[in-house]
Image (spheres, helix red, strand yellow):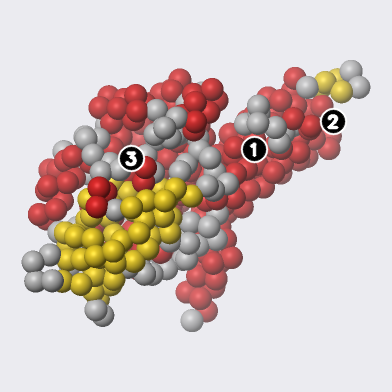
Amino acid sequence: MNFALTEEQAMIREAAETFLADACTSEAVRAAMDSAQGYDAQVWQSLAEELGWCGLAVPEVWGGLGLGAVEVMLVQEQAGYRLLCAPFFSSVCVATTVLAQCGDDAVREDLLPQLAAGQCRMSMALPSVAEGFLASEVSAQSDGECWLLSGTLARVPDAQDVDQLLVVARAGDELGLFVVEATALSFEMHTTWDSSRRFSQACLSAVPARRCDGADLAAQLAHCNALVSLYIAAEQLGGAQRCLDLTVAYVAERKQFGRPVGSFQAVKHRAAQMMIQIEAARSAVYGAAAVAAGQEAGLKLDVAAARALATEALQYCAGEAIQLHGGVGFTWEYDPQLFFKRGQASAHWLGNPQAQRAAIASALLD
């Protein structure tokens, strides 16, 4: 298996680094967090219209770039590095991925061109269990003319400014995929550890919905679980790397006893341990992305390993960044606390490290 990036993939990563370095400075991220929308609309417009990121993995026939998991992973890694405050994860990595993989031709022809152009935003609830989208608690009933959905979606990212919601619901003994207009829902915003990404609870009470699933939905959703979990791992990897970079820069300039604190052996060892955690996670994340791009067997296990390592890398590196920043590490004015909160929140999406390792053990031992 070749982990080396192609020339096109390297260009995408470089473009993501350059754009997000300018658009997502610490000051810009904090301003977006405090805004009514929770993100900078101009940044969203630029990444959609100028860079085409909304259509990265959308087939060209529906207006996208027709690329794959590696390209989305590369952008998502940089988004995690810069704490991108925009609905890229919810609309592109989650909803568009699921719709492109699981939707029927009619709804894909209708909605994917709009999503690829960034003209509409779609979100989807993130379950906390490793079964992911297969563990739906929403029910669907047909009244003969349309489908009606009832239930509660506990964690919907970026729900405050979406046009539509993609919902997995149980219709009797089978699963169905449905599109719901956001105006038909009531949302209650939840305060979480991560103030850089907003979550809401959506309540559905006989809400009209359009059914849009294609063939073999359960298998397709299981595949989407793996893809979305991979993109979460990429974001965590980027965040862990940023924590290391911030820490190295700080200890190089902070002086104690007449010398930079980074020159002390104990500090060097801790920074080196951060790097070890990051590189282990990077190998797992890039390897899982290569498996996904090649449509090879074993994706579920590779992604589970990547998620476990990336989750722990971000949590460890964010904690060490706070410690090595000394008395200012936990303060609002410095950024390590933002990454610590992101690490704590994202650890529970689609299964925590313990659940990921349990899935690996079950697959290998059963």
At which x and y percent is residue 66?
22, 42
Q: Amino acid at mark 1?
A: Gln
The numbered dot on residue 264 is: 2
**Label 3: element kind:** helix
| Separation (CA) of disc 2 from disc 3 | 48 Å
Above or below 290: residue 253 = above
Task: Tell whether 176 sits left or right of 299.
Answer: left
Q: Amino acid at mark 2?
A: Phe
Q: Is residue 290 visible?
A: no
Asked whether 297 or 335 is in front, the reply is 335
| Separation (CA) of disc 1 from disc 2 | 24 Å
Circle 3 packing at 10 Å, graded few (<14), some (14-19), many (20+), is some
Q: Kindly indicate the quadrant of the structure image that contains residue 331.
A: top right
| Separation (CA) of disc 3 from disc 1 | 26 Å
Asked whether 361 or 151 is in front, the reply is 151
**Label 1: element kind:** helix
Residue at 20%, 72% in the rendered image: 141
- Pick whichever of labels 2 and 3 is earlier in the sequence: 3
Task: Tell whether 27 sits left or right of 206.
Answer: right
- Pick whichever of labels 3 and 1 is earlier in the sequence: 3
